[in-house]
Amino acid sequence: MGNYLNFNRLQGVIPTLTTPESSYRRSENINFDWLQGSPYQGINQDGFTIVWDGAITVTETGRYNFYITADDGVRIYIGDYLVVDAWVFQVFFLFLVFFFFFLEVYV
C-alpha cells in the first residue's frame, strides 16, 4: 500500500501521514517512471513523497536484488533493517541493494 503525499521543499519538512492531500493506492509491483508527471491525482508533478508498506513474497532461499532510482531522498527498510539511508536532496541516482532471504519451512 502506498501513501502519496505532497512535499514542499521550501518548508523542508515532510507532511505527516494523515494530511488531507494524502492518497492511498495499492500497488502489486513498485515499478514506476513518472519523469515529470504526477504519480496520482491531486499529487504534485515534482515534490512528492510516497511511503510504501507491505510484504515481499519469498519463494526460495537466495539473494534478492532491489534496484531503486530516485531523485532526492530515499530510505528503504527490509523488516527492521535500514538498508538504504540517503534522505538528502540529490540528483537522479541508482541504488542497488542485495538482501539474502531464507525460505522457512515448518513441519
Image (cartoon, rainbow, N blue to C red):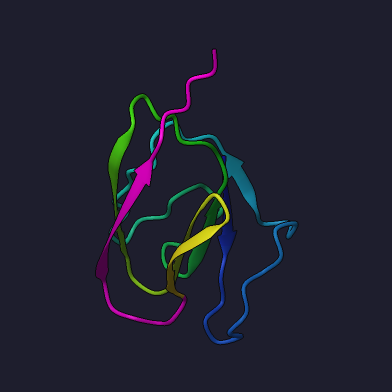
The picture places residue 51, in percent across and down from the top left corner, at 55, 54
Magenta-drawn segment: 87-107
Task: Decide which of 17, 74 is in the foreground and name it.
Answer: 74
Residue drawn 67% across and 69% down? 15
Where does the C terminus fall, quadrant-wise? top right
What's the residue at 53%, 34% (across, down)? 26
Image coords of residue 41 (percent x, y): 52, 47
Residue 98 highlighted magenta (yes or no): yes
Check residue 66 for magenta coloring. Answer: no
Q: Report x, y in % for residue 76.
A: 46, 59
Look at the picture and state if 88 lies above or below 100.
Answer: below
Q: Is residue 43 left or right of residue 86?
A: right
Identified at 29% across, 43% down, the residue is 64
The residue at the far top in this view is 107
Give the farthest residue toward the front.
107
- Up-down relation of residue 89 to residue 31 (above or below): below
Residue 24 as seen in the image, left or right of residue 89: right
**In the figure, residue 29 lies in which quadrant?**
top left
Quarter of the image with the N terminus in it: top right
